Image (spheres, coloured by chain):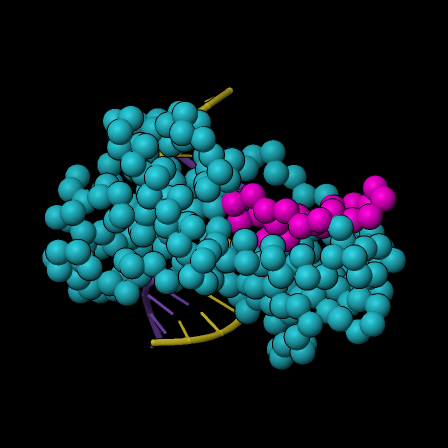
Chain colours: A cyan, B purple, C yellow
Amino acid sequence: MPELPEAERARQQIERVLGREIVAVDDRDTYVCRPHAPGEIAAALTGRRLTRAHRRGKFLWVETDEGGPELGLHLGMAGRIAVDEDEAPRQWDRFALEFAGGGRMALRDKRRLGRAVIEPDFSHVGPDAAEVGRQAFRDRVGRGSTALKARLLDQGVIAGVGNLLADETLWRARLSPRRVAGELSEDELDRLRRELRAATRDAIRNGGVHTGRFMPARERAGRCPRCRTELARATIGGRTTYWCPRCQPD
DNA sequence: AGCATTGTTTCACA
DNA sequence: TTGTGAAACAATGC
């Protein structure tokens, strides 16, 4: 599930538990909590309260009270934040906080590619895809010899675009994912940024990136929602990519 | 059975 | 040294 819209929803979930006292931490999953040893995150957080929840792209972090450490969270490929829900079966709750009074916040993640870490480092993460300014977007996205879609997926360029949001945005902007990023005109880059912001805003409002107009067509032999042309399919930027060869010519 | 997967990091190579 | 692309990682679902 998680791309920028899902991460924003997760951030809002975290806001529900701000101010509660942490009385226990489950950090036993040494893969999700790497490089921390079991008990390290627990020692850092027990007795503290979360005070503010932040997000940049798909990366989440939470401040704690009076100079306490920051807690970094990432949803990985399939994670979500579960607040005050019953414990998941099969140890799908890879990381969890328990609060005074019985409440609970868990990183629920079947695939186990999510992440929980103390004092996260975001120095190699680009500006948020929905916040980046026009000129910065032109400079960062509109360069290099790589395919446009691969550029959008690079979290160090702009943060928050995943495989589905990239296809949705490129379709809305009528740009081929195969275009060379550095060869786009200013007008094309501005159009791409506008459609990215719009697609992101729609997805947050409607409950996730899977609510996009292009998403239902995104399958083998799917057809363009605008012109009914059969979609093209290829691996670009290491991910399966669908686009309309007529609306989005190379 | 085999392959694909809404993500990130690491490694090899030009 | 920098940029790019592929593989590794874990587990599940079709």
User: In the figure, C10 relative to A159: above or below?
Assistant: below
What secondary structure prevails in the magenta region?
strand
User: In the figure, A82 relative to A201: above or below?
Assistant: below
Residue shown at the point (17%, 61%) measured from the top left: A223
A188 or A235, which lies in front? A188
Q: Is residue A147 visible?
A: yes
| Percent position of residue A242, x then y | 25, 54
User: In the figure, A199 relative to C12: above or below?
Assistant: above
Q: Is residue A150 visible?
A: no
Q: In this picture, which residue range is highlighted in magenta? A: A52-74
- Most extreme residue toward the right is A47
Q: Is residue A202 left or right of residue A103?
A: left
| Percent position of residue A190, x then y | 32, 32
Q: Is residue A65 left or right of residue C14?
A: right
Which corner quadrant holds the C terminus of chain A? Answer: top left
Magenta segment includes A73: yes
Magenta segment includes A16: no
Residue shown at the point (55%, 58%) measured from the top left: A9
Residue shown at the point (50%, 58%) measured from the top left: A6
Q: Quadrant of residue C11?
A: bottom right
| Percent position of residue A176, x then y | 23, 42
Q: Quadrant of residue C3?
A: top left
| Percent position of residue A169, x then y | 32, 47
